[in-house]
Amino acid sequence: MIITIDKSKSNGVIDTLGAASQRSGASIRIIDWNDGSLSVNVLGQIEPDVLIHPAITGVHSATRPYRLASKEHRERTVVRVGEVEIGNGTPVIMAGPCVVSDVEQLITAAEAVKAAGATVLRGGAFKPRTSPYSFQGLGEEGLRILAGARAATGLPVVTEVMEPDQVEITTEYADMLQIGARNMANFPLLRKAGKARKPVLLKRGFSATIEEWLMSAEYILSEGNSQVVLCERGIRTFDTSMRFNLDLNAVPLLKELTHLPIVVDPSHGTGKRSLVPPMALAGIAAGADGLILESEPNPDSAKCDASQTIEPEELARVTRKALALSRLLGVEDLVSG
Amino acid sequence: MIITIDKSKSNGVIDTLGAASQRSGASIRIIDWNDGSLSVNVLGQIEPDVLIHPAITGVHSATRPYRLASKEHRERTVVRVGEVEIGNGTPVIMAGPCVVSDVEQLITAAEAVKAAGATVLRGGAFKPRTSPYSFQGLGEEGLRILAGARAATGLPVVTEVMEPDQVEITTEYADMLQIGARNMANFPLLRKAGKARKPVLLKRGFSATIEEWLMSAEYILSEGNSQVVLCERGIRTFDTSMRFNLDLNAVPLLKELTHLPIVVDPSHGTGKRSLVPPMALAGIAAGADGLILESEPNPDSAKCDASQTIEPEELARVTRKALALSRLLGVEDLVSG
Amino acid sequence: MIITIDKSKSNGVIDTLGAASQRSGASIRIIDWNDGSLSVNVLGQIEPDVLIHPAITGVHSATRPYRLASKEHRERTVVRVGEVEIGNGTPVIMAGPCVVSDVEQLITAAEAVKAAGATVLRGGAFKPRTSPYSFQGLGEEGLRILAGARAATGLPVVTEVMEPDQVEITTEYADMLQIGARNMANFPLLRKAGKARKPVLLKRGFSATIEEWLMSAEYILSEGNSQVVLCERGIRTFDTSMRFNLDLNAVPLLKELTHLPIVVDPSHGTGKRSLVPPMALAGIAAGADGLILESEPNPDSAKCDASQTIEPEELARVTRKALALSRLLGVEDLVSG
Amino acid sequence: MIITIDKSKSNGVIDTLGAASQRSGASIRIIDWNDGSLSVNVLGQIEPDVLIHPAITGVHSATRPYRLASKEHRERTVVRVGEVEIGNGTPVIMAGPCVVSDVEQLITAAEAVKAAGATVLRGGAFKPRTSPYSFQGLGEEGLRILAGARAATGLPVVTEVMEPDQVEITTEYADMLQIGARNMANFPLLRKAGKARKPVLLKRGFSATIEEWLMSAEYILSEGNSQVVLCERGIRTFDTSMRFNLDLNAVPLLKELTHLPIVVDPSHGTGKRSLVPPMALAGIAAGADGLILESEPNPDSAKCDASQTIEPEELARVTRKALALSRLLGVEDLVSG
């Protein structure tokens, strides 16, 4: 059972629900949506009497396996990364290098992507690599460099965490935690991210169904972290013409199933630089709330993912077109000329 | 080896090439691109002397398994369906019911999709059905009804052929032959369509790689039919949230590999009515030359594919937005406002 | 509705059912199982009175989309190819070259595979090739060579048909028609094969579900040809370590769903010579009724599929082990030593 | 570069290599294969002089991305779980319930699977579940119960670890650590398991390629843990007739690529009880070194995976047949009777 609460009138109601749950052997989880409303997820039975309270705006039985992530529960969630809002109708452009190499590289890249119109900086400090012999990222040193780039540019920072023990330190430096495709079903990591005080960018596992993906979001939400953004980044199919197949169908389908914002990563989703701009725009046309792109000056010398990294000039073009396209499609009564 | 020829100066050159091929035991195939140029595909060796002729504008060795379909060979092909051009920069909207049921249904549907902005009418007379017990289409009767709808509306007609023996009769009635996903590797059918005097809409097999698809196009081209349009209609993946996964990555990838136009079918590509409009627009944003959509009045009573058929009002909205979006993206030096 | 009939007492009953169907606007299809029983598939309503007849041994409503192929309808079907029985408990080994090149090659190969224990000869006269420029088989000439090899060795012959127009001529020469993976959903071809007087080896499309495959078998059965053998030959997955992934799970699953025999093709199913023997034996352990293998002397010089063709010596080892393994697993009360 | 060393003569050579590496800025990793040989993986350059030493039996450049796991490096590895050897030619049967529920359930199950011929006990204490609301296992309490079952039956115990922090405690209780499919690319977990003093059962990710899987094994080996067993447990394909598709092709393919033992899990690999016995036997016929099976008395009341759990009587039949089949196939010069 999920109970929705008007925070402005909530005094006492959480305690009442907590006490009632304890009496009946149930447990509760509280999710603060940062917009004046709370959800209380009751696991178990509770006395019906306590549900009559002026702060309680709704009581829903959970009809889907993902209760809190479901659109049956909420219409829309806007996630805040620093000052940036994701899910408010205007696409957000997140960009930066694959991996943080050194201070100079990152500052240069951060300034370039900011000039190109990006409003969130991405970059990896902890890197999951298929081979134990590949460069694995700078770790905490990389986090410090990211924080420096934020100080220099004002851009909030999103970066990946790979294991529960990295969540705390990453939360200190970054504005948003990224959970990568390989860790979408790393349940201990999801739980830990659910306890963090920062928003989470949850990438889709490259062979995860839409329902499995929403269940992973549910892990984070059910621990009390309401600030989850979904990121489509390509699935694995029989076709190896591309590294992965960006599955844009997921975008409008998720819009029907969940209130969480969804962004698209055409860099990993195609693995091919020349396909990034058209697929980025296609993502926006499909209804995405934003893009996350690998971009830095001199992409050919990038320490990883060089073949899918675009130049800042290209990023600027994509950004301009994405915003224009979003405005165009937002005009409901568009008349053909 | 492929020889390109300026048709205006070609007098005698084809005969010369034919005679030279015969002498050396080679064979030749002639492809007329309908834009003043010819390609001659020489299978085998030929005397080099005959290659010096004012009408010969280029001689290329074939470096890809698909020689004639490759962008190495031509920059762009515009295909004409009746008076309609596919591949000239303005998206073409092809629409109509899944299957032709009777005269009244089709005329009504044809007028509705024409009013909504479609310029080509689609509709099935021969229907491939998974079950032998399902309705298999009206056959030649359906072709006659399609021709009647063309007469009534002026819209050229595209319809599916399922076996070599249907090609001739279909060519008499229709303006474009469709080869469906299940028949993409039906090589006898491809050869027969290659000999037809009508353009061909070649759908991608739902588990065909991009290269296999282009090889199927090559079958048609190599028989002398230059008028081939590729149609992405969804691939089969592990994810069964949708009937198929429309693979928009194929659009920009094909633009790099082939000169043939490519259209997108979001109706079969998603199998879900609500996903058709956003995926149609995403297809245009990805660079498609057109859309093919299942649409008719009262879609819920459609004899097949009801769940993916949209109403003409929705079709009109999609058409307006698709054209506006295409114009917007065509403005290269778009400046953000 | 499906009616089962004891052929020995059937005099008059078929006519009665036919007349009754005609009266009520239904149609009937008759399938002769070659074991003294008939099935009559009634499409439409029929008067219940006619169902009381001593020859009628059962009346079943059709609860699955594949009515005649379903195990609900029959327990087991044994298919006869020449004198060879498929599905009687002893595995059948079918072997031979990918393609028929000339008389000498085929006779040599046929004698070698016979000596190795194979009891059916395979070989292609009509070949589906991805490229229009590859060798496409000898056609009718190849059929004559196959018939010659049968005369020389006594082995019945199975060979592929690619289009409806090839069915008649192939039926004259061959003992079994093969429908290849690319044509599993070529419905006009299935219908034509359903009218042929020869058994059919129906390969699984490489991205066909089990149900789609059974529906294709239903096409053949519903036209009156009861002699259908299913052949698993590898599916397409994300893993390209092998050409295809032989899906042995299909074998025990089909044993639960259908009465038709099933054989396994580890040559196409793996595309790699060294994997053929272990996967052949695994197929038998999974319960297959036989194997179809590409084998000829000097496989490295084979005109197609060289990399998956095994030598006759290897074929002899596989055959011996397959038969021993089948006997071992047939001993139900096996006691460990 | 990989250096192989005869342990009996190795005195001083490791120190010499370590010192030389330090001088040239390289680092070394030592893998003890538990059979009298060591491998030293040198990451970086080293003076060639130090390679002349009586204990050094080979020096290999690394030609594959997986250096230590490759068959180029070693012919065969036998892994010891308690007293049980995996990879010595006789299949090992590992069995037990999906999840540990309580002492009585596990002792009963352990005794039943032992009586049925299993020699290793499986059972989950930490359970990865798609839903945050499902039972997640007993944790350390489950580990204690597993250790108790080992004490009662003498069977060594394998159980799953889900995060780096669980490795140490699990190593104290269990004889073998299992890394599940969802964690195959959880690199911090692989590293931690590479430092553990217990063998590791590494399941294949359900959409991992063979190479990615071997790279994950390389993570464990490169940290110094030589005792790795690979476990095929089904891949995700387009076909949803079964929960997963057990990919037996992987077994003979891995035998060509790696010296590590490989076992097969037909319980998760099919998700369907009736398919477990035939696919288990097919796995042995394909060359697997063992099986891991979900089995317990009264499987229908199992707390998880009930539909794929077999009864101990069925397990006994599978075990007997698997051993007989393995002996039969081991007889190289098998003569047909």
Image (spheres, coloured by chain):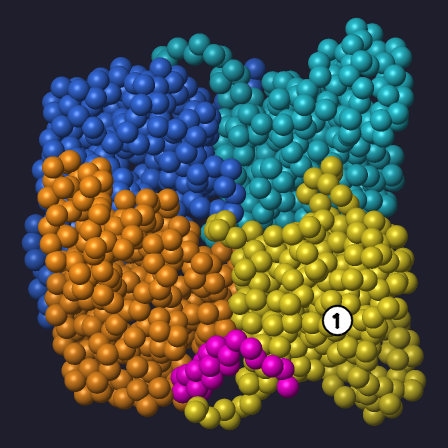
Chain colours: A yellow, B orange, C blue, D cyan
Question: Which residue is more in the foreground, C86 or B18?
Answer: B18
Within the image, what quadrant is residue D73 found in?
A: top right
Q: Left or right? Give the position of B124 relative to A24.
A: left
The boundaries of the magenta stretch are B315-337
Within the image, what quadrant is residue A73 found in?
A: bottom right
Q: Is D141 one of the magenta-colored residues?
A: no
Question: Which residue is more in the foreground, C259 or D40?
Answer: D40
Query: Which chain is disc 1 placed on?
Result: A
What residue is at 44 percent from the left and 38 percent from the top? Answer: C243
What percent of the width, then of the height, locates residue C10? 11, 49
Q: Secondary structure at mark 1?
A: helix
In this rendering, is residue B224 above or below D215?
Answer: below
In this rendering, is residue A201 above or below C59?
Answer: below
Q: Left or right? Give the position of B137 relative to D39.
A: left
Q: Is B335 one of the magenta-colored residues?
A: yes
Which residue is identified by label 1? A114
What percent of the width, then of the height, locates residue C77? 27, 40
